[in-house]
Amino acid sequence: MRIRKYLRNIDATGTLWMDEAGWPVHFEQDTRVTVRIFLVVGFELTQYDDFRFRRFGDRLVAVRHDARRSGAGGGEQQASDDRVVLEARCTLDLCGSGAAGALGLTPKFRPPR
């Protein structure tokens, strides 16, 4: 099947925010796709992603990711809203021994509201 034949529209935008040192701190991406098959069957897909970044030494870590997805077509509709947060915390065995700056990252999943 040839996708271009049925693809009607793609609209994708992205925005990147950077700090004074040139490190990324925030990125948003928004994508909308419209597909039409024959005259009566159509689909619309929407996807939005929002990333927050934080530096740990010389490493860049995504500490939060929000995602919203939705789709409609063929008489059906579907949507999801997800958030994943990484919380920085000092591990007990390393902090207790005096090793400063040791970080552990723990994923926290928050279901849609």
Image: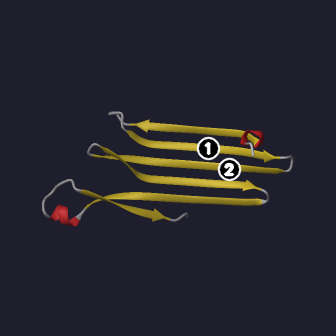
Location of residue 43 with respect to 78 vertically, above or below: above
Query: Would you identify the image quadrant in which residue 73 lies?
Result: bottom right
Q: What is the secondary structure assignment of the residue under circle 1?
A: strand
Residue closest to the eye, 2 or 25? 2
Density class for disc 1 (Cα within 10 Å; few <14, some 14-19, many ≥20) is some
In percent of width and height, residue 63 lies at 39, 52
Q: Residue furthest front?
A: 1
User: Label 2 is placed on what type of residue?
Assistant: Leu
Residue furthest toward the left? 98
- Label 2: few (<14), some or many (≥20) within 10 Å? some
Label 2 to label 1: alpha-carbon separation: 8 Å
The C terminus lies in quadrant: bottom right
In this rendering, would 79 be left or right of 49? right
Indicate left or right for 100 with 67 as reference: left
Q: Residue furthest right?
A: 39
Residue under pointer 2 = 45
Q: Position of residue 87 (x, y in %)?
A: 35, 59
Residue where numbered disc 1 is placed: 31
